[in-house]
Image (spheres, rainbow, N blue to C red):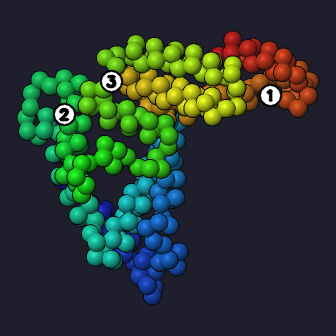
Amino acid sequence: MSKPSALPELLAIMAKLREPQTGCPWDIKQDFKSIVPHTIEEAYEVADCIERGDYRELKTELGDLLFQVIFYAQLATEQNLFDFDDVVKGLNDKLTRRHPHVFAKQDNLTDEQVAQQWQAIKAKERREKSTATEASLWQDIPVNLPALSKAKKIQQRVAGLGFDWPSYHGALDKVAEEVDEVKEALAVNPYSEHSAEEVGDLLFATVNVARHIKRDPEQLLRSANDKFSARFEKVQVYLQAKGQSLDTATLDEMDAAWEAIKKQA
């Protein structure tokens, strides 16, 4: 026996929260723009649960993220823009359209061919949506997307057009080239706009390496942040055990503690 859907109840709860006379004062005063920061925060909390492997809490956080979607749909319903069913139908259509290798029974496609087909379908959708004479390559990449994620999106877009290294080797060689250019710029003036530009190019090139090894650069940097933070906390404990502190230890002493902690890992 199939499990009854809890979705109708959720939609009813959301509508009641927005009821002008009897709803929640906070929910009533919200609009599309005011909810955006909460949506972003909830998405990061979902990512945090997954990275920590806390799947019990993940259930709760996914509910909080779903609530954001329900909230937007309720606002749209009130303004006669669309409703939740329209959101789901649009998603269903998009998924089947973008996966012809599943729903149109295309057989024996490689991962690379599937990725190329995906990009070609998205490019066709962009052309159809564009009101301009020529569709922008970047029109559906959010302006405020985190820079690492945006770099990956841009690189994926041009890769779909064939402008890409055949493997990570070319991307890695480009990183080495950019490192040399950063060194040259810093040798002339480390505080110049040119130096800053070269460092930006180096970051962009590094994202390309991550993309080629099928890793998300944003996630990789979050992991690196967490690893550094955890290790530096151990440095603090290490120094305290020797009667020192971060405030009084010299750089050499902190560096020695850092190396000692690395050997313990």
Residue at position x 48%, y 72% from top? 30
Q: Earlier in the sequence, mark 2 or mark 3?
A: 2
- Residue type indicated by callout 2: Gln
- Residue 66, quarter of picture: bottom left
Marker disc for residue 236: 1
Q: Secondary structure at mark 1?
A: helix
Query: Alpha-carbon distance for marks 3 and 1?
Result: 44 Å
Residue at position x 51%, y 16% from top? 177
Q: Nearer the viewer, residue 113 or 10?
A: 113
Left or right for 35, reference 4? right
Left or right for 208, reference 236? left
- Residue 263, quarter of picture: top right
Marker disc for residue 164: 3
Rendering coords of residue 135 (x, y %): 26, 48
Q: Nearer the viewer, mark 1 or mark 2?
A: 2
Rendering coords of residue 59 (x, y %): 43, 49
Left or right for 215, reference 177? left
Q: Nearer the viewer, mark 2 or mark 3?
A: 3
- Residue type indicated by callout 1: Gln
Picture layout, residue 195 above or below residue 24: above
Q: Secondary structure at mark 3?
A: loop
Picture layout, residue 78 above or below residue 222: below
Residue at position x 67%, y 32% from top? 192
Query: Alpha-carbon distance for marks 1 and 2?
Result: 51 Å
Question: In the image as oriented, which residue stretches furthest toward the bottom?
Answer: 21
- Residue type indicated by callout 3: Asp
Residue at the disc numbered 2: 117
Q: Earlier in the sequence, mark 1 or mark 2?
A: 2
Specify whether residue 201 is in view. yes
